[in-house]
Amino acid sequence: MTDIAWIDLALASARPKALGALLRYFRNLDTAEEAFQEACLRAIRTWPEKGPPRDPTAWLIFVGRNSGIDAVRKRAKIQALPDEDVISDTEDAESDIVERLDDSNYRDDILRLLFICCHPDLPATQQIALALRIVSGLSVPQIARAFLVSESAMEQRITRAKARVAKAGVPFETPSPQERAERLSIVSTMIYLIFNEGYSQADPRHEAAAFSDEAIRLARLMLHIFPSEPELMGLLALMLLQISRRPARFNAGDEIVLLEDQDRLLWNRPFINEALALLDKALRHRQPAPYQIQAAIAAVHSRANRAEDTDWVEIDLLYRALERLQPSPVITLNRAVVVSKLQGAQDALDLIDPLGEKLGGYFYYHGLRGGLLKQLGLTSQAREAFDRAIALAHSAAEAAHIRRQIDKMQEEATQPIAK
């Protein structure tokens, strides 16, 4: 008898390929999703008794296709269907599908599926929600809990996203090399958005924390399909390096522990080693791009056994390269941290002060500014910046971290001056 846990894993792994193929066949997201769900139900009923097929993905595509055709017939839609001899073919159609699974059609199927979820007409929150529902197969209640909204609100959000995609008339033809490159960039951004949605959660037990693992799974899938894309290697390396610190990011009281204070023995060394190997492979292509440079920055931190061993000069050079490649006030803000290490708090403050208008609603801007002002002894201005950061905090843990900075500043202010 086939283990039910194995079946769940097989269905989750096959979902992008199978759903992508069904989407190409039916050209309707709802029909494709319903066909895949029906195929999954049949798999759960039949595989435990008869054993799994030699290729679960091909089986799901074949069964889902036939199920979808039956459903379309029952709804009596005015829609062109394949010829009867194709629909009624009872020969070894699964074998034909298996032989074609590695062809470019199926590679483009998955890319198209991911691209539809990150359609530029959709807001980022809808992109993430749609990708988690369609590609990853998470339930609406799971996604709703992660985003801290009601199930009905999340259902409406996903429904609106599907409707907007349908209205946009996304083309189903095989993308050209240029379109594929553009789509890869958009898909990579969407995957990293999913990762950050989970990684930014201060509470590691929060439902959304699992999004980081799902983003890594999607990145591995994309790299399997496009094994020679250096920026995909950089993206996966970046996420592995960041997630490797997860065991050390919070103390026993679920309080945030800054990078420089983390116990580096807790970092996940296998993740780090895999990421460094991926990064080295990506850099050999000599096609530097943002994810590769960000991964290189994270790699410098991972190679330092102690915080004081960090090569801040190399990190500064990498941030300057990133600024030239992808100018952004957030990147400049991050470089300011490096400047404070190399040149002092005043130079760092001079660098970020002009960013106030663009980053006025950004938690980390006010948190860093407060820290720099505190170092310079400007306590009243630091307190003002810290208060603003607390107001913009995304979680109780972030707010608590800033409050501890205020408490330390007040304690230092009340200590007697040594004579």
Image (tube, helix red, strand yellow):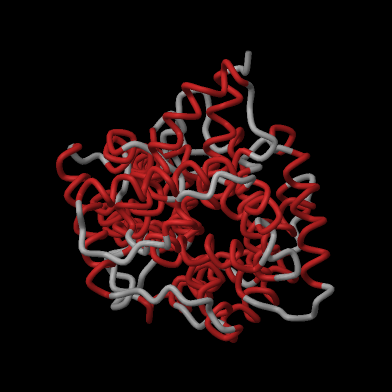
The residue drawn where x is 52% and y is 41% is 60
- Residue 377 in the image: x percent, y percent? 43, 59
Q: Is residue 195 above or below residue 318?
A: above
| Residue 180 vs residue 151, the one in the foreground | 180
- Residue extending farthest to the front is 85
The percent position of residue 351, horizontal first and vertical second, equals 48, 78
Q: Nearer the viewer, residue 151 or 108?
A: 108
Query: What residue is shown at x 55% (from left), y 38% (from top)?
Result: 249
Tell which of 376 and 146 is nearer to you.
Answer: 146
Q: Hey, which quadrant is residue 164 in on the image?
A: bottom left
Q: Which of the image's four quarters has the C terminus? A: top right
| 309 in relation to 317, above or below | above
Q: What is the total number of numbered labels drawn onto the structure image?
A: 0
Residue visible at 50% across and 59% down in the picture: 192
The quarter of the image holding the N terminus is top right
In this rendering, position of residue 360 left or right of residue 270: left
- Residue 271 percent coordinates (x, y): 73, 43
How far across and how far down the image is residue 16, in percent? 52, 51
Q: Residue at x 48, y 37 (%)?
A: 210
Task: Report whether 86 appears left or right of 388.
Answer: right
